[in-house]
Amino acid sequence: MLTGAALFGLPKDALLTRDPEAYWNRIREEQFLLPRWRAFLNNGSLGVAPRPVVQAVTRTVTQDAGLLNDEYPRWGYETLDQHRAELAEFLGCARDELALTHNATEAMSIVAGGIDLKAGDEVLITDQEHPSGREPWLLKQARYGIQVREVKISLPPRSWEQIADIVVSALGPRTRVLSYSGILTTTGLIMPMRAICDAARAKGVVTVIDGAHVNGQIPVRLSELGCDYFAGSPHKWLFAPAGCGLLYGRQEMLGRLWPSIVTGGWNNRKLGSARFMMVGTNNRAVIEGLMAGLRFHKALGSERVCGRIHQLARTVYERARKQSDLEMLSAEDDRLYGGLVTFRLSAELFQKFQALCNKKRIWIVGSQRQRVATHIHTRPRDIDLYFQTLEEARK
């Protein structure tokens, strides 16, 4: 049986050593459906599924439609132990600490809706949260009278020590929960997750990490982050199809969380985190696509994937910072970002730039705050085209 690189028909390592750009160009050409004319620089919104993932989804839909397998074709009642065990090994946690959801939004809503808080209890978030990391807490505030308070993150940040000090210093006597993004969706800043979680736990504060941008962009092990709960979106950076999410709960904390959507089995504590998967019939094909994406990532190698993502992002940062009319929002220290680099354009420049990008089929974030997101399918010429177009917009 073929395994690893041979299973996916990946180029030989010798090519990577001899000609790295030729290696990565072959990965794009052979493993992705992206046409050559598409410059895709918005992986932070939704990633691109490679061919093996598309094939896994298609194969599962076809098999299920024909009832070709003996196993009933669904998920939403099953615990999917083998799937979760394989994912948990890669993510660095126990199988029964990991639940499969549809996205990080759902996972964040499960956590916010499931934690017992009373009127006057405080949830601390940052001013850089994605709506899915902010609105579940605001819903709880409107319904139950808790208080949600924001702490301002410096832009651009100077160091992890500065960020950790800002967040930890903001914890107050009424703070019961600290909820923040592991990688900020607004700027790509990699937060000092372990330092923040350790300090919060020492104060008796529950920690929740919105990790939508974490898995696949940077190497992490969930059990080493020190958080109580974690929400993930493998359909951003881990090659999964849209509609895949993760919920991690530290073993000691799982019992404190109420499910939000339930069917039979929701109160079976022996299921561990799988209690939160008892949600009714769902599309099994996306789960098989998730597993194919995970195996594709592993076949390439996490160090290789994350290294390439960051190498391209550094190129973006160095080119952007030399341009005087761009306001840099990402940190100068490249340890503080992975594959997301952010800067702000003037309103006038952005309008011209966006029109040109649409014409040239460059896929970007549609706002003055430009968040350039690189992945292994990003080509150096895509970055060249981006900055050439920016220069054209200035004329």
Image: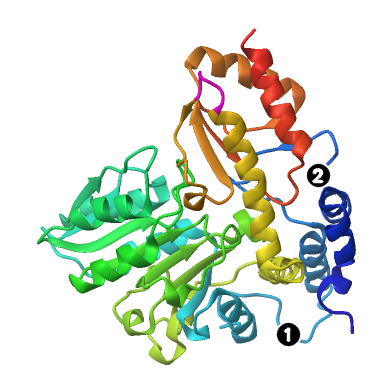
The three-letter amino acid code for the residue at tag 2 is Leu
80 over 161 or under it: above or below: below
SS class of the residue under badge 1?
Answer: loop
* Magenta-span inclusion, residue 219: no
* Magenta-span inclusion, residue 325: yes
The percent position of residue 173, horizontal first and vertical second, equals 9, 61
The three-letter amino acid code for the residue at tag 1 is Glu
Q: Residue at x 31, y 67 (%)?
A: 197
Q: Residue at x 85, y 54 (%)?
A: 23
Residue 368's disc is: none
The percent position of residue 41, horizontal first and vertical second, equals 66, 38
Instruction: Provide the residue designation for mark 1.
Output: 71
Circles 2 and 1: CB atoms closer than 8 Å? no
Quarter of the image for the N terminus: give it.
bottom right
Q: Main secondary structure of the magenta part?
A: loop
Mark 1, Cα crowd under 10 Å, few <14 / some 14-19 / many 20+, is few
Residue that lies at the very extreme toward the top in this rendered image: 395
**Frontmost residue, 329 versus 212:** 329
117 over 94 or under it: above or below: above
What span is colored magenta in the figure? 322-326
Report whether residue 139 is seen.
no
80 lies left or right of 264: right
354 over 3 or under it: above or below: above
Instruction: Provide the residue designation for mark 2.
Output: 34
